[in-house]
Amino acid sequence: GAVVSQHPSRVICKSGTSVKIECRSLDFQATTMFWYRQFPKQSLMLMATSNEGSKATYEQGVEKDKFLINHASLTLSTLTVTSAHPEDSSFYICSARRGPPGGPYNEQFFGPGTRLTVL
Amino acid sequence: DQQVKQNSPSLSVQEGRISILNCDYTNSMFDYFLWYKKYPAEGPTFLISISSIKDKNEDGRFTVFLNKSAKHLSLHIVPSQPGDSAVYFCAASAAGTASKLTFGTGTRLQVTL
């Protein structure tokens, strides 16, 4: 099967600091990665789509200067929450899409998530 | 604007019985639907999917039904097992959106002994 890892699994930081979350596809190359956030008892909300070697596409209402996404290689995408505030506390989940765009939708594999708590 | 809705936040079913999880959508552009299972503090895992050209897809104990005219889909689990206890999300995608998924709010399934 396809494995996607995230690091760290849990992070606590002070307000005003920046936090970097890594998403890696361990056994396949991911041309596209997605970043989601989930508030307690709510749905997963897509934040941005990240394509290797190009700028990320952000969903409406997501601040691209606050949530910096870098997809530098076919196996790694990073999400940096800059100048974090308590309202940024959430569960952040990435997914990685195997294969070229236009392929089967079920070829999208999710990481285990990162719990961010901003004090 | 919640385009994908799961109106039942929780469901309790006895082991061996059928579990039926429901999902409604509003966007008529959606043409592919997926069900994911999620445990706490973990990412979702794919269960089963269905294209809008079909009305049923079956995989072992899991069957997904799609009613396009009603914009409604359901996931049937038969027989239900204690290990099926988790949160189930339905998700939808539209052609030309680069596989972007819109998730429902989830239904927590509890399978009791």
Image: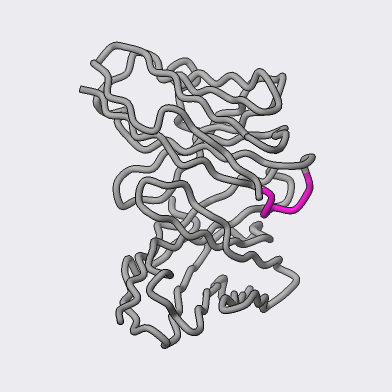
Is B76 included in the stretch rendered in magenta? no
Residue B69 seen in render: no
Q: Quadrant of the C terminus of chain B?
A: bottom left
Residue A113 seen in render: yes
In the image, taking residue B28 as reference, residue B95 lies left or right, namely right
Whether B100 is drawn above or below B78: the answer is: above
Q: Position of residue A79 (x, y in %)?
A: 49, 23
**Magenta segment, which residues?**
A102-107
Whether B107 is drawn above or below A30: the answer is: below
Q: Residue at x 63, y 53 (%)?
A: B93
| Viewer-nearest residue: B15 or B2 | B15
In the image, taking residue A19 as reference, residue A109 lies left or right, namely right
In the image, taking residue A22 as reference, residue B86 lies left or right, namely left
Q: Residue at x 50, y 18 (%)?
A: A68
* Predominant SS along the magenta part: loop
In the image, taking residue A73 as reference, residue B82 lies left or right, namely left
Q: Position of residue B74 (x, y in %)?
A: 52, 75
Q: Residue at x 24, y 16 (%)?
A: A15
Q: Position of residue B35 (x, y in %)?
A: 55, 63
Q: Residue furthest bottom?
A: B17
| Viewer-nearest residue: B7 or A97 | A97
What colour scheme does the image use? one colour
Whether A76 is drawn above or below B99: the answer is: above
Whether A26 is drawn above or below B83: the answer is: above
Q: Residue furthest left?
A: A119
| Viewer-nearest residue: B1 or B60 | B60
Tell me which corner region of the image, top left, top right, bottom left or bottom right, holds residue B111. bottom left
Q: Residue at x 39, y 63 (%)?
A: B86
Q: Position of residue A42 (x, y in %)?
A: 35, 50
